[in-house]
Image (cartoon, rainbow, N blue to C red):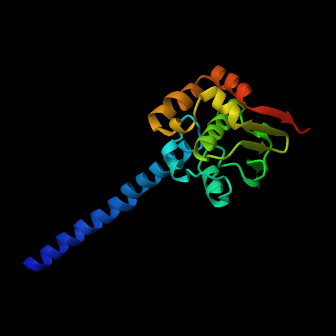
Amino acid sequence: MNRLTGTLLTLLTVAIALFLYMELAYIPEQEAQRERYAAEQLDPLTHHIEEVLPYRHKYMGNASNLFQLFGHLPLQDLRHTFQLYPEELTAELIYEAPAAEVEQVAMQRSLIYTSVAAFALIDNLEQVRYRFPDHIYTVDRPTAEDRYGPLEPLLNPERWHTEVQAPLRDEAYAGARFHELIRSESTR
């Protein structure tokens, strides 16, 4: 075997080894990390507020922006549409699945987190209504501001984590805050 053939075989072996590493280790690990990150975005306890900061806007009337915002907050995995009521400065999210299908504490945490984020990010949004087949949950900006103070400063990631996200870990806190912020009515 001459020197050129040996070099080519060595390069071929290295190329095959790199290909196998990429296909069997690196790419699957990257995909697993993407899946873990996507799962974190569904849970208000692990959601990254930085992901929704690009959707900050003065006006709720930018339907595309509002749709994208709610598509990146907890409850995004539940099939829904939305309706805007510009004269009331209200966004209504209309879910297909009943609220009863979502674990109660997870629902409370998600509605608190999503509502406060929406009010902090959309300057003129005054009310968010979450309509499920079995319940309607309504929250308004003045109530959120009474509980959290000025909302825009909360968008600092460290402050958001300390004042909004971390307290939600306590189930009793989440339940109490839910009842302070959100009006609930049964539709059945």
- The residue that appears at 77% across and 38% down in the rendered structure is 138
Image-based side of 62 in relation to 7, left or right: right
Residue 167's image quarter?
A: top right
Q: Give the residue at the far right of this rendering.
A: 188
- The residue that appears at 32% across and 65% down in the rendered structure is 19
Residue 3's image quarter?
A: bottom left
Q: Between 160 and 100, which is closer to the camera in this rendering? A: 160
Q: Give the residue at the far top of this rendering.
A: 172
Image-based side of 26 in relation to 82, left or right: left
Up the image or down, 180 lies above or below 154; here it is: above
Q: Position of residue 94 (x, y in %)?
A: 78, 50
Q: Between 32 and 111, which is closer to the camera in this rendering? A: 111
Q: Position of residue 75 (x, y in %)?
A: 66, 44
- The residue that appears at 59% across and 29% down in the rendered structure is 149
Residue 108 in view: no
- The residue that appears at 76% across and 43% down in the rendered structure is 130
Q: Position of residue 96 (x, y in %)?
A: 79, 50
Position of the N terminus, as image quadrant, is bottom left
Residue 127's image quarter?
A: top right
Image-based side of 161 in relation to 140, left or right: left
Up the image or down, 132 lies above or below 164; here it is: below
Q: Position of residue 174 (x, y in %)?
A: 65, 26
Up the image or down, 46 lies above or below 167; here it is: below
Position of the C terminus, as image quadrant, is top right
The image shows a total of numbered marks equal to 0
